[in-house]
Amino acid sequence: MAHRSRTVKLRRPVAVGRRISFIAARCYVPPMSKVDIRQALETRVLVLDGATGTRLGREHLGPADFGGDHLEGCYEALLLTRPELIEMVHREYLEVGADIIETDTFGGTPLVLAEYGLADRARELNALAASLARRAADAASTPDRPRFVAGSMGPTTRSLLLTGGATFDELEDSFRIQALGLVEGGADYLLLETASDPLNLKAAFCGIERAFEELKREIPVALSVTIEASGTTLCGQSIEAAYVSFEHRDLLYFGVNCATGPDLMADPLRSLAAIAEVPIACVPNAGLPDEDGNYAQSPEMMAATLGRYLEQGWLNLIGGCCGTTAEHVAAFAHLAATARPRAPQRQRWPRVAGIDYLSLEEDRRPLIVGERTNVIGSRRFRRLIHKEDFDAAAEVGRTQVASGAHVLDVCLADPDRDEAGDVRRLLASLVRRVRVPLMIDTTDPEVIEIALRAIPGKVIINSVNLEDGERRLARIAPMVRRFGASLVVGCIDEDPEQGMALTAERKLAIARRAHELLTGKYGLAPTDLIFDPLVFPCASGDEAYTGTARETIEGLRAIKQAFPHCPTLLGISNVSFGLPPAGREVLNSVFLHECTEAGLDLAIVNSEKIVRYATIPEDEKKLALDLIYDRVDDPITPFAALYRDRKPGEDDVRTLDSEALERRLIRRIVEARREGLISDLEAALSRYAPLEIINGPLLDGMGEVGRLFGRNELIVAEVLQSAEVMKAAVAHLEGYMEKGDHAAKGKVLLATVKGDVHDIGKNLVGILIANNGYQVIDLGIKVDPATLAAAITEHQPQIVGLSGLLVKSAHQMAATAEDLQQAGIDV
């Protein structure tokens, strides 16, 4: 940044009645630093200053200092009435070793300043604050150690996701005005801090972009969120989801600040360090204040905690938030002097987010995309939208998530209705009901932008293609870059005769062209492209589609090999269009299995309406494979004939009823069949004790589920359905078990670790232990280390058990053990 040094003459403002008159010379424009802040973050750990409010509180300011009763408590007003105090705070922090000082503009948006009648002076106040900080930073800078100015941008007093009180456009414009002033005043970077609402942040980034466009100049932007004691933001978003929501931005750094103090930041920082491609900051409160406003954490206590985080290699920047003083910052500077900065992650993998985070390279392929929130594919959902019962329509989505959907496909493209209006109203309800990422299925760019502004997290857009050449890419790609999203790319181009790619060769060729355009010309990350090789009906009788199922599988394999970092997606049920319902379910299941073997990552499918591959007889699998791979002269006729008069599940139920009781119970678990479960359990109780049933056929069933999953014959969604049946069976049997004397043997505390929702193992162990004389304390799912440590301290158990299903859960267990050891827990 090329700046010229200018002198600023500040005059003491004069209060006139209830208004303030201020006369100032031109805004300060700084000289260019020899080392910019990005370089500094790469070479050493930087230190941010401490709390402005805490320091000013020592001055015992009264209404006159702020310019009148109506301005008392507005620290931005001190820029007009007592600028020398603000400069004093800056100097004190710089003198004890701060590398960065923040402007006195935490509440500097017009939206917040309006509460004090200062909205129309927001740009002026922000420019003044930046120029004051700029002058102090430059005075303290040396050639080998420049000092920097962070333009503080607080979260405002509104929340689009939680409380409302403002529109997206109002917030965007408010942040735009603040950014204009901070840049004009000479800030080195903008700091969006103490953030908790991802929609507010989307508006902030849009406003900042507009400010940069107006000024024809850009400076870096950093983002810092606040994590509550629950381990999430106030809106419930995990730290991983918060980061992924804005990873498309060229952030200076991403961090955590404020909150309850440094102690509870270990797990969020560890999680960030594992995924963040940018530097990481930790700027905590000095604990929580007591009833007198005194903060509990001394400089030595905070430095000890931050020192551990630095030793772990998690951080690039440290500093203090509420309650911290120059003494704290001096301790931080001492730490930073010998610490090595973290090296950011260098490789991104495909990932999306809603309130929760989802890696698209999970060890649970294929991930299930729920297809029922779609007016084209679901009559019930379409009826609810036509009735304008948007809450009930949103419940359809919630039910899909409860049934195992990892992502929801949302399509409201009904030619009889206003799609844009319906999207606004549905999303207002849906984003408050589901935590999973959403996939917006539309061809209308206006609808896409509405969705991107309304959905917290990183959305999937379904879809774009080359049907009209680059025209649609040119409209949608800039939105993806602006808001952050993953983009489904269909294998279609503008060829008038074969636009929809039918062969594997054409599918790969179109994918190559789209990949080159979107990553090259339009600058999207390769990991944000999801290729859809397209599925066509293989049994419709149309010769044009004969063999297309095989071509889809081979095209999928070729695309995955060519672009291993790009996920793949298919709408599975298209393959069976035109076949009898029972046959469709079987064909869908076999096709899904073959596609998964070829590298499928996401499947748009109704997982409750698909037959389990492992339960399909071999002769029926052969008929399905003959049809999919077109390997006999007429594969359609024998397949259709077999299922023409069969109702879905009919033969399975008949066979199940004829089997021995023990075998029936095993199959009910393997096939996730609840109907008849209770009557079978009652019959078993006449022969066996409850624990014998659990340890016998029920656990045998779960063992078979595990073996089938290991052979890729069950997908994770089906494993979880089996677990739900197991849970229901055990819950019924529990009522017949005699409870031991809890006091006799002690307490056992159980929890499923952070990032995992699978609790069948934990629940089984809990029941068995409880019936052997222990008191069981079950903390539930997704339990972070801090919550676990607090529960151990409260309950003093003799044993702690951690549960999880995913591979990453084993790593989380190790991290949890480390945190418990650090907390002095040796149970």
Image: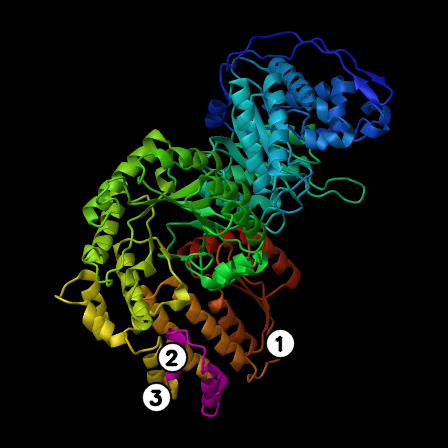
Q: Which residues are magenta?
A: 663-691
Q: CA distance from mark 3 to mark 1?
A: 42 Å
Question: Looking at the image, which residue is at 53% across and 60% down?
Answer: 384
Marks 3 and 2 close (CB-CB < 8 Å): no
**How many C-alpha atoms fall within 10 Å of the one at disc 3: few (<14), some, or many (≥20)?**
few
Q: Residue at x 24, y 46 (%)?
A: 507
The disc label shown at residue 742, or none: 1
Residue carrying label 2: 666
Identify the secondary structure beneath mark 2: helix
Secondary structure under tag 1 reads helix
Q: Residue at x 60, y 42 (%)?
A: 197
- Amino acid type shown at disc 2: Ile
- The residue lying toward the viewer, choosing from 412 and 240, is 412
Measure how far apart labels 3 and 2 are at the Cα level: 14 Å
The residue beneath circle 3 is 658
- Dominant SS in magenta: helix
**Quadrant containing the C terminus in the rendered view:** bottom right
In which quarter of the view is residue 187 placed?
A: top right
Q: Three-letter amino acid code at disc 3? A: Ser
Residue at (29% x, 51% y) in the render: 534
Q: Is residue 113 above or below residue 581?
A: above
